[in-house]
Image (tube, rainbow, N blue to C red):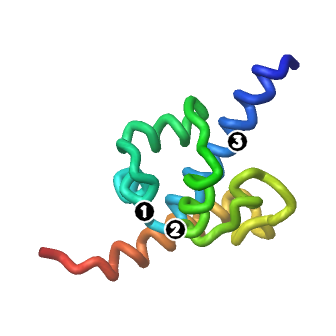
Amino acid sequence: MTRQENDAEQRRDLGARIRSARRAAGHSQGRIAAVLRVPRSAVSDIEHGRRGLDAVELRRLAAELGVTADWLLGCDDPGPFAALHPADQRSAELYAGYLLWRRTPTT
């Protein structure tokens, strides 16, 4: 694997973790875009591994999502759902989204 291929794979892994944490937190891409002060399309690019993050963006994002930068980067922090089976992780994310939806006032 070349360095460029390795970098691309790491960006895709980072994007997948960000997407997972964003969904678990019940945030839209638009909300994350506002936190990062970037267009919503940039959040999509991040989640698909087409764009990276600088250190300031990474810290801001981790704080908003309630995870550590190490977890987002795939380092030694296992994250909030690490002990769960992958199917259960998805169920927990969906249920968290449902709970947030229920708390949202309707207009």
Specify the amino acid type for callout 1: His
How far is mark 3 from mark 2, CA to CA? Answer: 19 Å
Camera-side residue: 93 or 26? 26
How busy is the neighbourhood of tag 1: few (under 14 within 10 Å), some, or many (20 plus)? Answer: some
Question: Which residue is disc 1 drawn over?
Answer: 27
- Calculate the distance from the C-alpha at mark 1 to the C-alpha at mark 2: 9 Å
Q: Which residue appears at 73% of the width and 67% of the height?
A: 79
Relative image position of residue 26 (x, y in whole percent): 45, 66
Circle 2: residue type: Glu
Local SS, label 3: helix
Question: Residue 12: horizontal and vertical position, in percent?
Answer: 66, 36
Q: Is 61 located above or below residue 10 in the figure?
A: below
Q: Which residue is mark 3?
A: 13
Q: Which residue is mark 2?
A: 64
Say left or right for 41 vs 58. Answer: left
User: Closer to the camera: disc 3 or disc 2?
Assistant: 2
Please give the name of the residue rendered at 55% of the width and 62% of the height, measured from the top-left corner. 60
Which of the image's four quarters has the C terminus? bottom left
- Percent coordinates x, y for residue 18 in the rendering: 59, 52
Q: Residue at x 70, y 41 (%)?
A: 13
> Measured along the vertical axis of the image, is residue 92 above or below residue 6?
below
- What SS does tag 1 mark? loop
**Quadrant (top left, top right, bottom left, bottom right) of the N terminus:** top right
What residue is rendered at 37% in x and 44% in y? Answer: 40
